[in-house]
Image (spheres, helix red, strand yellow):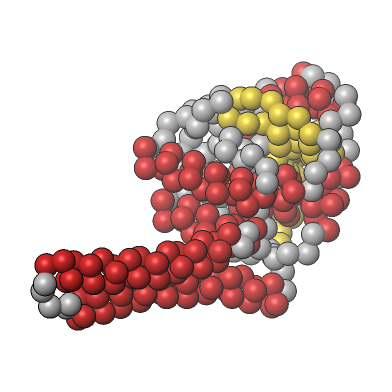
Amino acid sequence: MLSVVIPSYREEGIIEKAAQTISEILSKAQIAYELIFVDDGSNDGTWFKICEVRKLNPNVRGIRFSRNFGKEAAILAGLCAATGDCTAVMDCDLQHPPKLLIDMYKMWQSGIEIVEAVKRERGRESLLRRIAANTFYKFMSKATGVDMTSSSDYKLLDKRVVEVLISMPERVTFFRAMSSWVGFKRESIEFDVEERFSGVSKWSLISLIKYALRNIVSYSALAIYFASMLGALSTLAAFILLVARVIYSVSKHVDFGMDYVILVSIFLMSGIILIFQGVTGYYISNMLYEIKARPRYIVAEEV
């Protein structure tokens, strides 16, 4: 059986269409399946729609969070609830083409334990958002040692892989990085991002930046190394400015102007110290989350 985990946040306009489309494709291919919609604390009619769809289709299951815990928590909850021999994770907005599930399932049947759907292109995005996304995934690729530049949450995992993922104890999770880190036999399959059937993206630029910072800090010490390197470079820059000022003063027979060098050095060092403190603060905040060991999500209701 194939379990399909579908995180859903304020998706009342597409729940029925998503359930119908995926069910028709899998039924036609004669694949036993369950659809697990995880309502991530939506404040619209998403949960009502999930319950309505469940009445029409016994293969549909629903999980509702007590509040918004984020997409990563929704994916984890779906993986924990999945009972299939393999589990796919896909977006509710149908930008991940459901018909690709058939090919992914066949690849799993051939012995592939992780089937990754990678984007040929990112679809319609602003230039700023595209640059920010590419920068983030290049950074994460260096941090994890795995190419994540074209990665997506659209994956199909063997049950053994799912068990490993849900056994990992960290509170701050990043599904794309975790599923790459665990290893196992994997292959990729390309897809084109579809147009959204309904609604708009719930990710603002600010929320994406926060999401990126959290995951970079969670999965790499590169940020703190970068801050240290920046501090060393600023010290070098201040030294070069000092030497340049001395040479200029001697060659032109003018006053050394120590106040200039001191001022430049203060500005450089102050900026670097603040950057270093900010980066350190992110790591400490993540440590705080881990030490508290609060549940990564709270289920309010299931159907």
Q: Is residue 82 left or right of residue 129?
A: right
Q: Is residue 104 above or below residue 286?
A: above
| Residue 303 image offset from top left, x and y in percent | 75, 51
Q: Is residue 31 left or right of residue 38?
A: right
Q: Nearer the viewer, residue 197 or 150?
A: 150
Instruction: Give the residue at x 69% y 72%.
Output: 290
Q: Nearer the viewer, residue 235 or 215?
A: 235
Q: Is residue 20 above or below residue 159?
A: above
| Residue 199 image offset from top left, x and y in percent | 46, 39
Say if residue 237 shows up in the picture: yes
| Residue 181 image offset from top left, x and y in percent | 74, 48
Q: Nearer the viewer, residue 161 or 303?
A: 161
Instruction: Specify the quadrant of the image occupied by residue 115.
Output: top right
Instruction: Specify the quadrant of the image occupied by residue 187.
Output: top right
Instruction: Specify the quadrant of the image occupied by residue 147.
Output: top right
Q: Is residue 77 above or below residue 184?
A: below
